[in-house]
Image (spheres, rainbow, N blue to C red):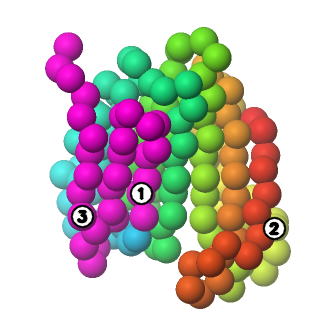
Amino acid sequence: MKELKHMFVEQTEKTPLVDFNNLTGELILSGRSIPINAPRIFEPILEWVNNYIKDPRPTTNLRLNLEYFNTASSIWLAKIVKALTNIEKQDCVLFLHVYFSLEDFDDIDDIKDDLSPVIDVVSNSKVSVGLKIYGTDEAGKIMKESMIFI
């Protein structure tokens, strides 16, 4: 088996920052995700995740701090989350941290509607999953947060 290494990819105007640290279990996607060729961006990320789940940290934090993502990106994000829910190591926990701009949503029901695909993906999870939602202001400062255990 190939040794897993830290995955870091700089953010561009159309692709997110990718900072996946196998030693800490911190997996960060932030910025914008509107790539022209989504598989080119996300296939290496999904391959990394599939290797990571073979020897995960006790706590894995997937931080989705995406100000905007297109439909193609959402399909790949669901694949990444689905792969992470297949962690089989006992006593492991997966936390999904999702960041939303408060000005983009009128109430919590709007956020729940947007998160329903993620909740559907994790409903048959092998690992314990917690979902933490953060409401941010225009500067990205966290103004509200809520925790849900799935």
Q: Residue at x 79, y 46 (%)?
A: 148
Q: Residue at x 60, y 12 (%)?
A: 90
Q: Is residue 67 left or right of residue 136?
A: left
Alpha carbon separation for disc pair 3 and 1: 10 Å
Q: Is residue 88 left or right of residue 21?
A: right
In the picture of the structure, the residue carrying the numbered disc 3 is 10
Q: Quadrant of residue 149?
A: top right
- Name the residue type under label 1: Leu
Q: Identify the element where label 1 is drawn.
A: strand
Disc 1: CA contacts within 10 A as few (<14), some (14-19) or many (>=20)? many
**Mark whose residue sits in front, 2 or 3:** 3
What is the x, y in percent for residue 3? Answer: 20, 23
Split into 4 quadrants, where in the image is the N terminus? top left
Q: Is residue 4 left or right of residue 23?
A: left
Q: Is residue 20 left or right of residue 91?
A: left
Disc 3: CA contacts within 10 A as few (<14), some (14-19) or many (>=20)? few
Give whichever of 150, 92 is nearer the camera.
92
- The segment highlighted magenta reads 1-30
Indicate yes or no whether the magenta region holds residue 5.
Answer: yes
Checking the image for residue 108, the label placed there is 2
Checking the image for residue 29, the label placed there is 1
